[in-house]
Amino acid sequence: MQLESKKREFLLAVLNKWIRTASSKTAGIEFAEFESVISKIRHGFICIPGGKGLLTPCNRIIAKRPRRVFLHRNRRLTTALKDMRTLIREATANPTKCKELVMGPPDYIGVKDASIHGVGGFIVGQERACLPTVFRMEWPEWVKQEVLKTNAGQKGTLTNSDLEMAGLLLLWLVMEEVCDLTSGSHVALFSDNAPTVSWVNKLASKNSQVADQLIRALALRLKLKGASPLSTMHIAGDKNEMTDIPSRSFGSEAKWFCREDKTETVSFAAAIRYGWYTRGGTVRAGTVSQALSAVNTTIALDINEQPFKVQGSKDFLPLISQTLAGWAREDPPTEKKMPVEADIPEFLAELGLEKGATELTKAVGDLSLMAFYFLLRVGEYTIKGRRNESKQTVQFRIKDVTFFKKDHRGILRMLPRNASEEKILSADAVTLKLENQKNGWKGVCVSHHSNGEEYNNPTKAVGR
């Protein structure tokens, strides 16, 4: 869905005109014009999800009904108008999909709570799987002081409801990281703060200017992800005990303290083990060990501490070691693979001799012989379907090939670069210089002599 071109061009023209006059102290906007255009924008935002979250400053102006609207007096209104212009422009290039307008059973569920000390919550999958996640964050000291002023009846700039709204925005940002949010994803958010639930459902706030900015940020994130309208619901405080712990874990009461221990690292190892960070499915204990070692090394390079290993040692912490040992006992025995012998690449090469064989078939056969004789043990010679950036080198470059032929005394002599096809195909030996190897040795040469066969011959395969 998208706006009609005439309506879109009209709204953009008006918004551009208003924004150009934002610095003028005399060029105000007639209220009747302002109310009429905002009404058209409101109607147009039916097909632009999240657009309603930008209208709160406009709603406040319409409620006051001034004779003229001066943008230089209201920076929040000017910013909102610029955001509206951006959304209308962006909707031209990326029309809204109908599934982004319809609510449905939640794919993911997030629950949060905020206290004067911090915010915390948890995320789980409902219709779709995600890594069950608990998060928490302590508020900066100035935030705590402003809320304390408000609670004491002084002129603080923040309220408890503002903290709850900020907590819900943080919950959404965490969900962006741990959930596979795609176009049309359905998300349910739970909060025990009634004003926050009302603000998010309406994407508007009547009185809190702090909530205005938080709603605006949430609306833009929803548009960026293409999520369907949020299902925001109220949960009674006494039913929200799971989020009390992380949100109050920075508090003054000892019972809420979050005691750091090594069980968190075991939880991370379990997430690796059961496929949350891989391509799905359970992985072996050795894979978990390698992943933990890689993360441990990265952290050690940054802060000079090893979270998973005994300090000054290569050994994992006892709890992790015991866990890995238990998983190793559960792993199935290693399956030995049958070795590839010469008959397989020779069969592929002989396919090129069959009647009607294509040049591609012949090339595949020759490359199979080359891979078998030159690179089967020392190098990586295939291009992977994914993550090719991890390959250190690609072999089989023409400049790395050197042919040799015996002279009248039986001594191998190097053929020149401009040797004829006849001499190349009759060469007695060939050397392939390897740019790199799995063991890290570079510039090593692998040589093979002609085996005397007419076709299944490594020297002739390279020559062809």
Image (tube, grey):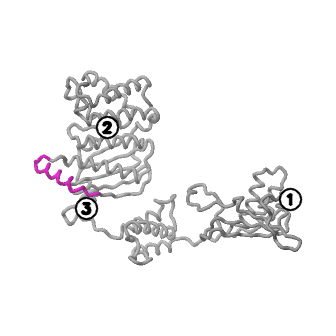
Residue furthest to the left in view is: 153
* Coordinates of residue 296 in the picture (x, y in percent): 42, 68
In the image, is residue 318 above or below residue 394?
below
Q: Amino acid at mark 1?
A: Glu
**Mark 3 vs mark 1, CA separation in Å:** 80 Å
**Mark 3 vs mark 2, CA separation in Å:** 32 Å
- Which disc number belongs to residue 422? 1
In the image, is residue 195 above or below residue 442?
above
Comes first in the chain, label 3 or label 2? 2
Q: Say which residue label 3 marks.
A: 249
Quarter of the image that includes the C terminus: bottom right
Task: Identify the element where label 2 is drawn.
Answer: helix
Q: Which residue is more in the foreground, 87 or 354? A: 87
Q: Nearer the viewer, mark 1 or mark 2?
A: 1
**Mark 1 vs mark 2, CA separation in Å:** 76 Å
On the image, which quarter does residue 406 sit in? Answer: bottom right
Q: Which residue is more in the foreground, 262 or 99? A: 262
What's the residue at 86%, 70% (across, down)? 407
Q: Residues within 10 Å of mark 2 (few under 14, many from 20)?
A: many
Q: Say which residue label 2 marks.
A: 53
Quarter of the image that includes the N terminus: top left
| Span of residues in magenta | 137-155
Q: Amino acid at mark 2?
A: Gly
Q: Is residue 464 visible?
A: no
In the image, is residue 17 above or below residue 437?
above
Q: Is residue 39 visible?
A: yes
Q: Residues within 10 Å of mark 3 (few under 14, many from 20)?
A: many
